[in-house]
Amino acid sequence: MPSHADLSLEAGLVALKQGNYQTAIAQLEPVASNQKNDNAGLQARVGLVMAYARSGQVSKAIALCENLLESPNPQVQEWAERALEHLKKRQKRQNTSSNSATGFVAFDNSNVDAAESKQQGKQTVVKAASSIGTSSTIPAAGFQNPNLETPVEASSFIGSINRPQAKSFNIYWRHAGRAKVWQPLHKLNLIPLKLLAAGTFIALFWVMREMLRLAMSLTNQILVKLPYVKPLQFLYRDPTVVLLVVLAIAMALSPWLLDWLLKKFYGQQELSKDVLNGYSREAIRVLQRSCQQRGWQFPKLRILPIAAPMALTYGNLTRNARIVVSQGLLEQLADDEIAVIYAMQFGQIVHRDFVVMSVVLLVTTIVYKLYQQISEWGNKFQGLWRWPAIILASLAYGIWCLLTGTALWLSKLRLYYSDRSASELTGNPNALIRALLKITIGVADDIAKQEQTSWQLESLNLLAPVSYQQSISLGSVAGHIPFTSLLMWENFNPYRRWFTLNNSHPLIGDRIQRLCKIARHWHLEPELHLTSEQALRGNHQSFFLQIAPWLGIPLGLLFAGLIWLMWQLGFALKIVNLKWIYEDWSFVTGCLLIGFSIGMVIRMNAFFPDIQAANVQTDDRLPNLLANPSAIPIDSINVCLAGKLLGRQGVGNCLAQDLILQSNIGLVKLHHIPWLGQSINPQDWIGRQITVVGWFRRGATPWIDIQSLQTQNGKTINSAHPIWSTVLAVAAQAWGAYIFLRG
């Protein structure tokens, strides 16, 4: 959570940028005197030099520059030397000229081109506060003008003190234009969105009720078997009414409950209009204009101190709506891109889908924090004492996944609507295209820097503009291959939507394709030129093989119907009388399990082919594997990739849900299934250099099914994907046969 000093520093630097020098001095002086030589103190002193000089207090500026010469930061020393030289020259002119009271001309920006200032302004003084507590100092070459002729250049230097080096991407942004005057798009049909929102609430209620019933039943069954204890009678009651009342109260109080949760566990704070205006003036204008047109109150603004770019909206009424962005989003996006993200969040308020999503966020956040606390508690133990925490954490994580799953379809559909609203409110679909792509890059960069998926990213993912799962590979490989090639799978694969059924967000390529259509509708050049909008012809045989286990279920149902018909015919002809055995229809379940098992067996060899050293793909081929528009997971491309193993350590990763390989090219998700009795887990190797051998699968989220992991010293962990698939198929077959024969 940002401290008071951090907030004062940010406010002072924003005031300096806007030319409010007395306000800047009032905000920066306490920070400069209290923080001494830490990052905040150094930035405050550099800002004060500028403020003193621009307000005519040259003597104070000189004294502070002389103090900065003793700074342990060599970059600050060099800047102070140059600034001091110009300050003394200016003081000398003041002493010899009656017209010398105009201030410090070395910092005069009268000759700076306005367009240049706007272009550089994004990396100026407003970013200084965000650099607190970051990595080592950047080289002195980080500022180019030794004379520091403008406040833009000088303030860019302030923000660069101890700022981490941004990841270098070879990315070309076309910066396609925006509409000056645009016609509204055709009116939206909100009925599907509203029906899906109602269905999501019903699904959330049903899942919670069934889990509650199961917990109540198990509790009483345990109490019955224990001596001297009687079952609790209220646990035999139907929890439907009580649960409905609880959810209604949760919906009514969701804005304030989420305020408390996000403030306590995520460091959320209020974001003033002045601070937001320092990052994006257009965002304030868009929100004000949109609210005035509808007669609404200005939404409450919040900020999360998270380096990854993200945004979310929650509340229950338009007057209680909160728009939350992260510090990383404000820093990594341009003025118009920030504005279009705010317009996107405002669109969710207009469509009112944020009401149900707020309830889902409230319920899932509570469960997720329970999972996080159990994980952190379990990390304090070793050996057998750790197992209770592992079991409880796995159970909590599974419940969180189930509750999150109730809102997956609504989460996908509402983003199409909000993308469209953002384009209409700003007339700038191209800015939203850039914003979405930059968010994927920023999220992937945050995962790489933290060497794990942070708790915040995972728990808030459902309401984020872009899913962290789809950002892992797309954002990290950006720069190695053009976006038009990288998005070909998401634009043209004929089966792509089948692979998003369990995803929380629609494909970015699909969203960008729709935004490009809006741009062309307004006669704008789109940010990305997609080669074609015609889907490829798919290999139906491969796709049917991919879904063979699930095709086996309806085939099993058909088989059950044929069996029933034969029994009825045999009974009618008095050939055989089995009606008394199968009159309860339980045999249908057995047929479904047998059909699923047969599908698993049919798919097995194609899904896990033998890996030959001669045909494995290495990490330099990763961009091409991602760009192949016709690939589907059943293609099972053999790979051997080297890199660092990333992921969450300890109990929080007991299900291996957060394993990522960081190669020289980018990040890719790893799937691991342990074998019984295995003494070493991949979590033990997180942070080490490894070699992964396995099967690369191109779906909505690319991943690798691990065959083996090997360290540099030769230790190996084998993953049991084929074994467990065989076990699952045999178990389903045996269970189905037992049910079928028993009747």
Image (tube, rainbow, N blue to C red):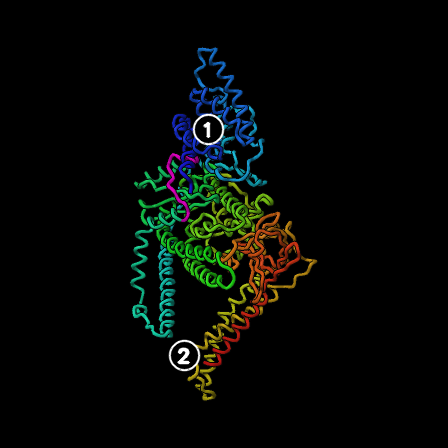
Find disc 1 in the rendering and name its residue. Answer: 47
Residue 513 at x, y = what percent? 50, 47
Secondary structure category for the residue under label 1:
helix
Name which of mark 2 and mark 1 comes first in the sequence.
1
Q: Nearer the viewer, mark 2 or mark 1?
A: 1
| Residue in front for this viewpoint, 299 or 348 | 299
Residues marked 2 and 1 touching at CB (< 8 Å): no
| Label 1: how many Cα within 10 Å (few below 14, some 14–19, many 20+) | many
Amino acid under disc 2:
Asp
Furthest-right residue in this view:
614
**Residue 650 visible (yes or no):** yes
- Residue 311 in which image quadrant: top left
Image quadrant in which the C terminus is located: bottom left
Amino acid under disc 1:
Gly
| Residue in front for this viewpoint, 554 or 281 | 281
Q: Which mark is residue 584?
A: 2
Residue 413 at x, y = what percent? 42, 53
| Residue in front for this viewpoint, 418 or 141 | 141
Region in magenta: 265-282
Image quadrant in which the N terminus is located: top left
Image position of 270 with respect to 652: above or below = above
